[in-house]
Amino acid sequence: MSVKQTVAKSRAEIFGNIRRGLGRKGNSGEASAEQKQAVQNRLNAQADNLIPQRAQLPHDEQVELFKAMATEAVAELIELDNIALVPQACADWLKTRHIDQLISASSSEINSLDWSPLLNADVDRVERVAQAGDIASLTSSFAGIAETGTLMLHSGPDSPTTLNFLPDNHLVILRRSTIVGVYEEAWKKVRAAFGGTESGLTLPRTVNMITGPSRSADIEQKLQMGAHGPKTLVIFLIND
């Protein structure tokens, strides 16, 4: 038996033991609806940990806290009355910085917009994964967390994670209605959107928490922007 076959056999035995321990039958290891609901019930019954008082606010005050914390984290905040204004806001921001290409997620929210303002500004919008050397990207976000001014984004076929980290400038659409107070509430939103037995959706492979642009002061205690990701984070806050 080859080394590759031996490893495959060992892995199969390990997974088989795990399936038997979980009470699952068959080779697929797929949990039954009852088992999934049992997990959901256990999660719902779990009490929250100690939650900071500063984020336990009415929603309007949570939005104001998010704005203050995001700005303190050196994110650029642009408020818009509705999402239809995003293309013009993108065009204006990119044109003033002489950026002629925008790498974009291909979500239905983004594709439903009229992107003619980019053409008028001589900016090309391309839907693909981000690559080294890309200057600017555009994505939507799943939620905003007021406690620390943090964006929650998740990966998917129409929004690859590379868009969040490779380009120097990351432009993000955030709806006011999706802002929550604390991290616990954001994770509950993820489970409600993707983890329910009736949703037919699976949890995203990657969930990213982004607070301001990337930075580091490891070298001689001098703050360097863009150390591990974008140098600039722009949040288009939609007052929906």
Image (cartoon, rainbow, N blue to C red):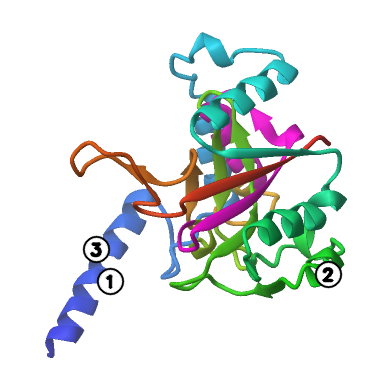
The boundaries of the magenta stretch are 165-193
Whole-number angstrom distance, CA of label 1 to CA of label 2: 57 Å
Q: Residue tagged by mark 3?
A: 14
For mark 3, give the secondary structure: helix
Depth order, front residue of 61/29: 61
Rendered image: mark on residue 12: 1
For mark 2, give the secondary structure: helix
Q: How many marks?
A: 3
Where is residue 222, by image quadrant? top left
- Which x, y percent locates residue 179? 67, 31
Q: Residue tagged by mark 2?
A: 120
- As for residue 169 lying within the magenta part, the answer is yes
Lateral position of residue 201 relative to residue 215, left or right: right
Rendered image: mark on residue 231: none
For mark 1, give the secondary structure: helix
Lateral position of residue 220 relative to residue 175, left or right: left
Residue type at numbered disc 3:
Ile
CB under 8 Å between discs 3 and 1: yes
Image point (46%, 72%), residue name: 133
Q: Nearer the viewer, mark 3 or mark 2?
A: 2
